[in-house]
Image (tube, helix red, strand yellow):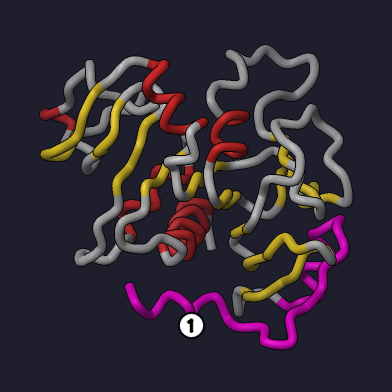
Amino acid sequence: MDRSQIKGFIAKRVAKELKDGDVVNLGIGLPTLVPNYLPKDIDITLQSENGFIGIGPTPDKDKENKYIVNAGGAPVTINEGGAFFDSSTSFSIIRGGHVDITILGALQVDEKGNLANWMIPGKLVPGMGGAMDLVVGARKVIVAMEHTAKGKAKILKECKLPLTAKGQVDLIVTEMGVMEVTSDGLVLTEINKEFTIEDIKNATEAELIISDNLKAMEEQLSFI
């Protein structure tokens, strides 16, 4: 599985978590691939923190509008019925609990559901953006990311980088498996058949509880 396959595999599995009628905010990078894997008959409303709701498909190169971009600056379209508004209205939607699910990447996440995804000390960063508000305001928080970074674990006993939020992550989806954050710790509920449980444990610093009903990730993707 190369990197392009890994990202698509993760995005496809995350898409399974979305249901008809959901209002969803997508973080930059990998999460923006999720709409590519939604069933045709599902109606999802995508909200962009920079000020609009009703994000449509990625435009063709010759049809890009430089004034319609998502929070990461990538060109997007807006569906019929969508709306543009100012930042205060956008964050009223987020902080008011009107976002059902937020999907974002992470630098680190730990077994208590703590999230670090905005900075590495000593490196220049543009700022936290809306991540702090999104993970607290959304009803469900899904971290979609590669399991490791340059061979180093990203799923830890305790985050070492500055936190974005404490105890807000509900689900972690990587190319290796799916983990639910529970009061008892991280529960591995699905596994990619290309890996063994031992592979996942070796790539994860946090303790993993293996579900009694452990499923193959691939079997959960048959609906797409």
Q: Amino acid at mark 1?
A: Glu
Picture coordinates of residue 38 (x, y %)?
A: 31, 61
Please name the residue that numbered disc 1 is placed on: 219
Q: Considering the image in quadrants, where does the N terminus appear?
A: bottom right
Q: Which residue shows up at 68% across the image and 65% down it?
A: 179
Q: Is residue 193 highlighted in magenta?
A: no
Q: How many marks?
A: 1
Q: Which stretch did the figure color magenta? A: 196-224
Q: Which residue shows up at 75% across the image and 46% down it?
A: 167
Q: Quadrant of residue 124?
A: top right
Against 69, residue 78 (above or below) is: below
Can residue 201 be seen by looking at this rendering? Answer: yes
Q: Considering the image in quadrants, where does the C terminus appear?
A: bottom left
Q: Element at badge 1?
A: helix
Looking at this view, is 14 or 138 the one in front? Answer: 138
Picture coordinates of residue 95 (x, y %)?
A: 51, 31
Q: Decide: few, some or many residues near mark 1? Use Cα within 10 Å; few <14, some 14-19, many ≥20.
A: few
Q: Which residue shows up at 55% across the image and 21% down it?
A: 129
Q: Would residue 127 appear left or right of 91 to someone viewing this image?
A: right
Against 118, residue 4 (above or below) is: below
